[in-house]
Image: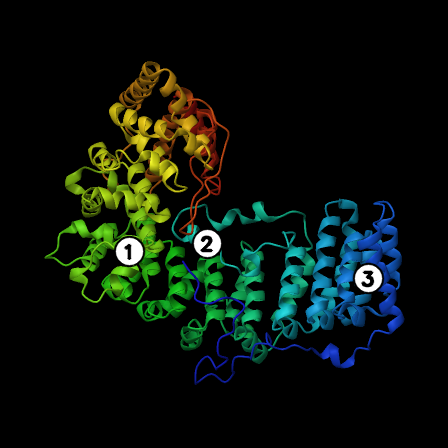
Amino acid sequence: MGRRENENTNKSNKPYNDNSSFEAKPSMYNQTTTDSHSVRKQVDPETTRYFWEIQNLFENEGMDIEERPIVCGNALEEVRGKELELATDAKISHVLQTLIEGCDLDHLCVFLRGCAKSFLSIAMDRAGSHVIETAMKALALHLQEQENYTFIEETLVKICKVIAVNPIDMMCNCYGSHVLRSLLCLCKGVPLDSLELHGVKSSKSLADRLNMKNSRFQKDNIWNTHSGFPDLLNLVVSGILKCDKKKMYDVLGDQFGCLVLQTTLKLLSGHDQELLQLVPVFLGCEKDNLVEENLIDGSVRPDILEWIKETAYSHLMEVILEVSPESLFDEIFSKIFKDSLFEASCDQCGSFVIQALISRTRNQDQMEIIWEQLGSKFLELLENGRSGVIASLISASQKLHSNEQECCDALVSAMCSTEESPTCIVPRLLFLDNYFRYETKSNWSWPSGTKMHVMGCLILQEIFSFESVRVPVEFEIVQPYLTSITSMEAEYVLETAKDPGGARVIEAFLSSNASVKLKRRLITKLRGHFGELAKNSSGCFTVEKCFTASNLSLREAIASDLLAVRAEIFKTRQGPYLLRKLEIDRFADQPDHWKQRQESIQAAYKEFEVTFGSGEPKSSKKDSFLSENANVKSSQQEGLKNMREEIEHKLTPAAPSQKRHREGGDGRKEENKKSRKRTEKSTENAAKMPFLSSEMPERKVKKSKKKSKA
């Protein structure tokens, strides 16, 4: 959703609020020295000369691969007793990194044990931090062999014990913070170079919030590369928990300290007992006053509402909301945010926290509270540039089947007055920022050549994916949006298809179950430009969606456009796939045979719908998201969709799998895989979906059998 500041820049270090007895700790990012510099000895010239000779040996003369570990090990033996001064030397530290990468496990662990006594000083040094991180990456490689596990654990125990005594200084140091996060990842058994675990926001988090990918509960299975050292992880975390309230406030006010807390929470995601102890402390509550079912002290509410206006803590609060167990989340919602949603949404940093809160909402009672406070504020939120809050609210309403009609109506009211035609809604959403920056909005017109607004495009994608798109027109809650997109001028439709975000809007519309008539009305406006779009990195996917939604005459028109520029399309990244999928070579050589195949595909679709039905619900409003029937119906619809795809797969030539890579908007899903799984695989996957429920296995087996018979 865009980030308000780079993590490497520090905001003002003012107190969180005037009533707080503790001030935010000044960031140590700009410090160029550590305590180690004042106590360490200078490296003597003879030692310096020795390590430069080693460096020249690697760089100039080369070395046999079998001799390398021996030379590196012998050189590391010369480091014993001098770890602090050598690791923190700006030049020799580079040589040490080379030695660490080339030595065997024994010498590596001996080196790290020698560093343990001065570990904090080395880790908080600009040069020393790189040496330590190189050593941890080397340990991670050795952990691929199970027999090394015990030896490595003995080494890490010495380091973790040193850190647990006083972790605060290391947490709040720009170099030490990164080292500590890497160590926590190593103890958990996950990759050390995971950007998300180091506090970098990715498009995946946006996809989570807007229901574009699976939930956080699958992370452990994806991340773990080895069994890790859970006892050592708990040792370091317990050291953090032992800090007194003043020191914890220092951490909460420091951007690097908050990054460590974020990593800790993400690594403990799913470990509810540990989170129930950690999260209240990270919210400023007294750890000695924690009582089950009353974990959050309401007195911290004013402080937290101020803290989330700071960049560092707002990031931390987002993670807290994402990983908190349900009971704890409910307390946070009711005791902290319940009556301050709009106020927090208006703040630049606080709005991201509210987005995380809305996306985590799991019941309709909470959704009703959110709607009461934000439902009438769409226009104010858009004018303040808080479109992400609206996107999260629309996504939650779709997920919970609550206030869908109201969300769509409120957005229409915010985008156009009652005197204006609804045809202006989609163009204004496509250029959301441009429209609201325009002084005289009634005179606003399509700004050709301007990049379309990412969040506006995502909002439109969400709306076109509403279940309500599939009900009869007289009950359409998204009818104004359908009218608007199909009423756009042909030149504007073409420009939309060329924009990365706009192309996804058109694809969402074509993928919905809106009427075939409306889809083909839009496709017709692109006639004569499909070859041009196919050469565009974004447009080629739109061409494929248009082809799928077209009748035979429109498919023939698309194929003719592509054939005219076939050679140019073939040179693009996705061009060969598109030409193969649409069988353009067959169209060129055997046009009659090509037409027969397309007729066969459409005939198979019709026969399928006669046999199995369209899979479209008569009324989405009658199904509750908590209803078992709603889950079964959704699973059946997914099965029918997979079977339709199987029909097309069997009637079109196979193609190797490719991922979709395009510029533009965050949170994109991988689409258009060339090789589809067979129907049996689809039904098997559908059967696995409710696996988290302890009551599901019997139903899962029965459902799978029924689908196999179909």
Q: Residue furthest left?
A: 419
Q: Disc 1 or 2, which lies upstream in sequence? A: 2
- Pointers 1 and 3 in contact (CB under 8 A)? no
Helix, strand or loop at label 1? It is loop
Alpha carbon of mark 2 to alpha carbon of mark 3: how far? 39 Å
Give the class, few, some or many, for how many residues have Cα within 10 Å of label 2's Cα (few <14, many ≥20): many
Alpha carbon of mark 1 to alpha carbon of mark 2: how far? 23 Å
Q: Nearer the viewer, mark 1 or mark 2?
A: 1
Report whether 673 appears left or right of 33.
left
Q: Is residue 180 visible?
A: yes
Helix, strand or loop at label 3? It is helix
Task: Name the residue type under label 2.
Answer: Ser
Q: Residue 81, relative to residue 497: is it above or below?
A: below
Give how far across and how far down residue 401 sits, in percent. 29, 48
Quadrant, the C terminus: top left
Report whether 27 appears left or right of 526.
right
Helix, strand or loop at label 2? It is helix
The residue positioned 41% from the left and 42% from the top of the image is: 537
The residue positioned 46% from the left and 29% from the top of the image is: 676
Image mark for residue 431: 1
> According to the image, label 3 marks what residue?
111
Give how far across and how far down residue 95 sits, in percent. 78, 61
Q: Residue 427, relative to residue 438: is it above or below?
A: above
Task: Name the residue type under label 1.
Answer: Phe
Q: Is residue 625 visible?
A: no
Give how far across and how far down residue 203 sits, in percent. 46, 52
Q: Disc 1 or 3, which lies upstream in sequence? A: 3
